Image (tube, grey):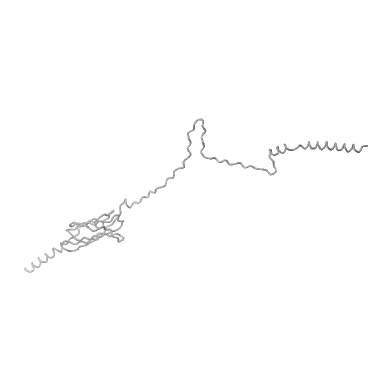
């Protein structure tokens, strides 16, 4: 009987340290949490820990932890790289308790992305075309005619020339330089009469 009690007490004494291992009490982010963004990971254990290792893995397998984790008694803090893309992540951690027993675990969480960062401005900038300025009229000055800006091109009217027609000026010049026909008729008539009289006078004895 005494031997049985001694064995029971010895077994209880040996089992107590095993049941007193360090455990994770809280974390930020929490398991299966949905966050807009993340700048650091915080782990709080039941007692002081040593040699912490914290890895932050993204949906593409890339690691996003920055630098080494900092330990302050039972609390471990790990900085995270900026601008985490939206997706599913996991925090894999490993620490060593005061009795030298290593413990580890994994915390899954999801980054949804903040509304301000994910919002894409859909308002496009439309170039503004300035209207064509109309000519400005200067105020009228008494006694001075307004000046019209711009050159008005006059379309010349087509002129038609008939072949064989002479202008009035050419006819006037021609008429001024010619002798009238009746003058020549009178001259030739008088000359013919004179010639006839001379011939008739020669035939008479």
Q: Position of residue 51 (x, y in %)?
A: 20, 61
Q: Is residue 75 left or right of residue 13?
A: right
| Location of residue 17 in the rendering, given as x and y in whole percent from the top left corner | 14, 63
**Which quadrant holds residue 38?**
bottom left
Residue that extends furthest to the right in the rendered view of this protein:
205
Looking at the image, residue 44 sits to the left or right of residue 134; the answer is left
Q: Position of residue 123 (x, y in %)?
A: 38, 48
| Image: 108 above or below 172 | below
**Picture quadrant where residue 60 is located:** bottom left
Image-based side of 80 in relation to 143, left or right: left
The image shows a total of numbered marks equal to 0
Give whichever of 135, 89 is nearer the camera. 135
User: As drawn, which residue projects farthest toward the top?
Assistant: 142
User: In the image shown, does 105 or 68 lie closer to the viewer?
Assistant: 68
Q: Which of the image's four quarters has the N terminus?
A: bottom left
Q: Position of residue 3 (x, y in %)?
A: 7, 69
Quarter of the figure with the C terminus = top right
Give whichever of 102, 112 is nearer the camera. Answer: 102
């Amino acid at each position: 009987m005494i031997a049985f009690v001694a064995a029971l007490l010895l077994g209880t004494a040996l089992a107590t340290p095993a049941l007193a291992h360090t455990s994770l009490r809280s974390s930020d982010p929490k398991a299966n949490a949905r966050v807009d963004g993340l700048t650091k990971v915080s782990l709080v254990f039941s007692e002081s820990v040593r040699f912490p290792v914290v890895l932050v893995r993204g949906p593409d397998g890339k690691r996003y932890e920055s630098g080494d984790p900092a330990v302050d008694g039972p609390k471990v803090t790990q900085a995270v790289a900026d601008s985490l893309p939206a997706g599913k992540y996991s925090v894999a951690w490993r620490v060593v308790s005061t009795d030298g027993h290593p413990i580890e675990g994994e915390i899954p969480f999801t980054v949804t992305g903040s509304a301000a960062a994910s919002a894409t401005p859909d308002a496009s900038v439309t170039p503004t075309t300035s209207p064509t300025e109309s000519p400005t009229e200067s105020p009228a000055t008494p006694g001075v005619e307004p000046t019209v800006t711009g050159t008005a091109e006059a379309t010349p009217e087509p002129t038609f020339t008939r072949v064989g027609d002479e202008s009035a000026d050419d006819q006037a010049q021609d008429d001024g330089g010619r002798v009238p026909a009746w003058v020549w008729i009178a001259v030739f008539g008088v000359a013919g009469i004179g010639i006839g009289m001379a011939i008739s006078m020669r035939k008479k004895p």
